[in-house]
Image (tube, helix red, strand yellow):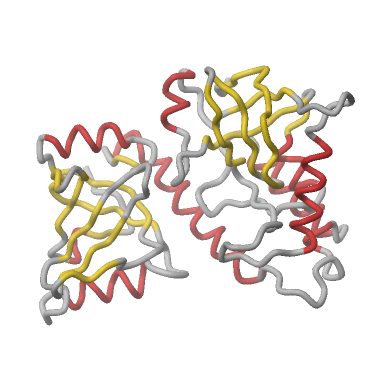
Amino acid sequence: MATRIPNLQITKVVDGDSIKISINGQTEALRLICVDTEESHPGGSKPVTAAGKAGTEMAKKYFTTADGGLAQIDIEFDTDDSVEVALQKHRDNYGRLLCYVHKDGENYNLKLIEEGWSPYFVKYGRSRLYHRQMTEAESAAKAYNLMIWNPIINAKIPSRNYANLLPWWSMRGSIVEEFRLSEATAGVLSLRLHYPKILAASEKAKSLTIFCDLQAGINKWIGGSALIYAGSVYHKLDLWIPDAETDEMAPLKRLIEKRYAGLGRGYVYVSGKVEQYKGKPQIVLKDIKQLSDFPPQK
């Protein structure tokens, strides 16, 4: 059985896939996993669409009770950890809780896919619990031209290019699945899932292999050396390439730019000594062998 926390009060519906709730006396933001409704608010990198605006209105109505208040929901995590571990482990790059939402026995994440409000979003990994249901729901929504799959809905305005995005997401989802299958035996730590262990290792300058995402590529240049923010505000990890502009380091820089950054694989196994630098874990990269598509062989 996956971890569930029942009867939580919604405090705000932000948009189709983002909700705020009250839990343990605090307000927590939720990011619904395996879905990605289109945008209804400007300011981000993705276009605002008619489907996005309609999805936000649908969500607000869906979570509003008969007396005009907001509903109570259950949240469900994608693993069977204890509640305490799940609340720490399942967070995105902005600290939001990653979960499924259930209202009155209905899986809202699955509803979004079934009704065409969202694709089955596997960019950060497939659903461990509902992979088949979500795959079949997306197929049916496409077949019946529902919402985002209906070209009329977002006609004559900028919209998302799912023809390009879906194969890329699927490739990334397959990489995460490979990591999950090898996780128990390879001794690899996921930057997001095992961050406390990475912090502890950095305090003792231990050598590790960390599964992380280099989609953003090189973020900063400092005196000819390159800095990569491999993590996030919530899960910090720096990769430092000294003398990155030299001929010796050129292959390493090219590997990151050509294979992992942008619309490349993104995910990579990074090996090296993890140390504390200015309060953050850091690995120094000097060799392309420190980056791999595969976990280390035992």
Left or right for 150, reference 24: right
Q: Residue furthest bottom?
A: 247
Q: Residue at x 16, y 47 (%)?
A: 278
Left or right for 127, reference 150: left
Give the quarter of the image for residue 84: top left
- Between 175 and 51, the one lying in front of the other is 51
- Between 8 and 42, the one lying in front of the other is 42
Q: Quadrant of the C terminus?
A: top left
Q: Position of residue 164 (x, y in %)?
A: 61, 71
Q: Quadrant of the N terminus?
A: top right
Left or right for 239, reference 27: left
Give the quarter of the image for residue 21: top right
Give the quarter of the image for residue 47: bottom right
- Between 106 and 166, the one lying in front of the other is 106
Q: Position of residue 116 (x, y in %)?
A: 79, 53
Q: Position of residue 129 (x, y in %)?
A: 61, 34
Q: Residue furthest front?
A: 68
Q: Position of residue 154 (x, y in %)?
A: 80, 68
Q: Residue at x 17, y 52 (%)?
A: 283
Q: Residue at x 65, y 21 (%)?
A: 8
